Amino acid sequence: MVGSEYNQIFSYEELREATEEFSKSKELGHGGFGIVFKGILKDGRTVAVKRLYKNNYKSIEQFMNEVKIISSLHHPNLVSLYGSTACSRRELLLVYEFVPNGTVADHLHRPRSSKNVLTWSVRLSIAIETANALAYLHAVESPIIHRNVKTNNILLDDGLHVKVGDFGLLRFLTVPQGTTGYVDPVYHQCYHLTDKSDVYSFGVVLMELISSKQAVDLSRRKDDIYLANMALNKIQRCQLDELVDPALGFRSNWEVQCMVSLVAELAYRCLQPDREIRPSMKEVLETLRVIEKGD
């Protein structure tokens, strides 16, 4: 292992040992372009090791250059990329900061959701911290479009603070851009994603936080399969109360009702089919902060 704490070059052997030879028991999950394993390095650090699917990248040189750029980014709400294996190897492994408390999707839709820890104030904080991370990516010297904003890529630490993962690398991979239910509908017309595409995806995340419903659910009626469509229709018909998770106290707590309504209005703007009408991520962040203050 060489280099500073960030942008390190790890040996394949060290990472194989750290993950107990990529043991099934160490698997944290499967992503769109690799399998993630929990590992413990020789220096004692617990890390997440992403093993990319073979031949899943267009140009290894471009990809490794992007790894170098991303590992230089530091923000409290972004997952830190420590480094990777050397580009001379046929199999690429990425080494990330380990985030222990699962994803927002886990807490909204899977077994963790039964613990009911995501109160409205926590959900609003998650929205603000996620927007903060995305606004930072859009504002760096060479702006970075996340390209795959979704609740599965928003991780939570032990204090339920956000760490956004899987940013920046998608354009160098031979995988579809974005995820069904979150991807900007304009993408299917021009196959081009912009910062406003991230805004659209974030609008879907906001509606998930409000409703606790999944972005795509085939068991819902035809017009409601996609949460984005469902949300636009409900808001247009002034039926927001039918969409909000009852556990949030929307009908009984006037303050929650006001804040949820304002966040839903913001999500509605983010989900507009015309990219030009959508706010920037900076504007989204500023609006959420005003809502949180109760102004």
Image: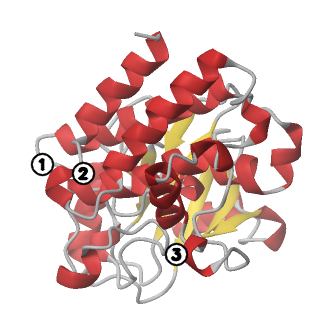
Please determine whether, in this image, residue 128 is positioned above or below residue 167. Answer: above
Q: Residues within 10 Å of mark 1 (few under 14, many from 20)?
A: few
Q: How much space separates mark 2 and mark 1, taking CA atoms?
A: 10 Å
Name the N-terminal-most of marks 1 and 3.
3
Q: Are marks 2 and 1 in contact (CB under 8 Å)?
A: yes
- Residue 32, label in figure: 3
SS label for mark 1? loop
Q: How crowded is mark 3: few (under 14 residues within 10 Å), some or many (20 or more)?
A: some
Residue identifier under label 2: 69
Which is more toward the observer, 282 or 70?
282
Question: Comparing marks 2 and 1, which lies closer to the viewer?
Answer: 1
Residue appearing at x 55%, y 33% in the figure: 126
Q: Can residue 103 be seen in this view?
A: no
Residue appearing at x 51%, y 56% in the figure: 231
Residue identifier under label 1: 142
In the rendering, at what x and y percent does residue 215 appear? 57, 64
SS label for mark 3? loop
Which is more toward the observer, 123 or 171?
123
Q: Quadrant of residue 276?
A: bottom left
Amino acid type at image mark 3: Gly
Left-right relation of 175 to 106 = left
Left-right relation of 243 to 85 = right
Q: Do the residues labelled 1 and 3 touch (CB within 8 Å)?
A: no
The quarter of the image holding the C terminus is top left
Which is more toward the observer, 176 or 235?
235
Residue appearing at x 49%, y 70% in the figure: 181
Left-right relation of 77 to 239 = left
